[in-house]
């Protein structure tokens, strides 16, 4: 079994900062891409930022310059540092990872349970 466990969501004022963390646990042979998505009420889930095992990042245009994604391959973790948050970024944020559980199988996509981020004064 593989689990992605998220932490760090909460309530923040506009212009504030939050850091989200996600740890992959369980039967893990290797991890390819890791990333963060978000879904606001009534909207589709969208990519916020992703990072390859080699450290190459893909960040949504809407958050470039404000959000930073990083990972620790030794600890199987991925973090999202969010600065200058806006009210419209209120959403449930989900961790995502493509994981190979055992060497004899391919990669599977896993999701965390989601963590609420609310940006409001």
Image (tube, rainbow, N blue to C red):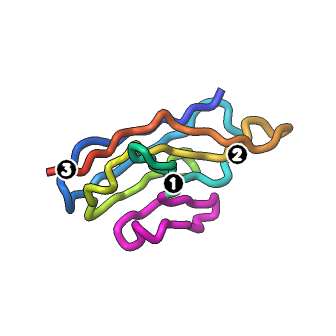
In the image, residue 80 lies in the stretch drawn in magenta: no
| Disc 2 element | strand
Horizontal side, residue 75 vs residue 42: left or right: right
Earlier sequence position, callout 1 versus callout 2:
2
Name the residue that disc number 2 marks: 30
The x, y position of residue 64, in whole percent, is 42, 71
Residue 8 versus residue 53 in the image, above or below: above
> Residue 72, labelled with which disc?
none
Are dots 1 and 3 in contact, CB under 8 Å?
no
The mark closer to the camera, 3 or 2, is 3
Q: Residue at x 27, y 41 (%)?
A: 10
Magenta stretch: give its range. Answer: 48-70
How many marks do you count on the picture?
3
Earlier sequence position, callout 3 versus callout 2:
2
Distance from Cα at disc 3 to Cα at disc 2: 38 Å
Are dots 1 and 2 in contact, CB under 8 Å?
no
The x, y position of residue 113, in whole percent, is 48, 33
Residue extending farthest to the front is: 42
The x, y position of residue 109, in whole percent, is 67, 42
Relative to the observer, which residue lies in front, 8 or 15?
15
Earlier sequence position, callout 1 versus callout 3:
1
In the image, residue 66 lies in the stretch drawn in magenta: yes
The x, y position of residue 4, in whole percent, is 53, 36
Residue 58 versus residue 98 in the image, above or below: below
**Disc 1 residue crowd, few under 14, some 14–19, many 20+, Cα 10 Å:** some
| Disc 1 element | strand
Name the residue that disc number 3 marks: 120
Distance from Cα at disc 1 to Cα at disc 2: 25 Å
Q: Residue at x 72, y 36 (%)?
A: 101
| Quadrant of the rendered image containing residue 11 | top left
Name the residue that disc number 1 marks: 46
Residue extending farthest to the top is: 1
């Amino acid at each position: 079994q593989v689990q992605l466990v998220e932490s760090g969501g909460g309530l923040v004022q506009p212009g504030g900062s939050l850091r989200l963390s996600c740890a992959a646990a369980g039967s893990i042979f290797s991890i390819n891409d890791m990333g963060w998505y978000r879904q606001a009420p009534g909207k589709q889930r969208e990519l916020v930022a992703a990072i390859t095992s080699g450290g190459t990042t893909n960040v949504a245009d809407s958050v470039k310059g404000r959000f930073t994604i990083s990972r620790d391959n030794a600890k199987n973790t991925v973090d999202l540092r969010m600065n200058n948050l806006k009210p419209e970024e209120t959403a449930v944020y989900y961790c995502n990872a493509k994981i190979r559980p055992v060497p004899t199988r391919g990669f599977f996509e896993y999701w965390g349970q989601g963590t609420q981020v609310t940006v409001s004064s």
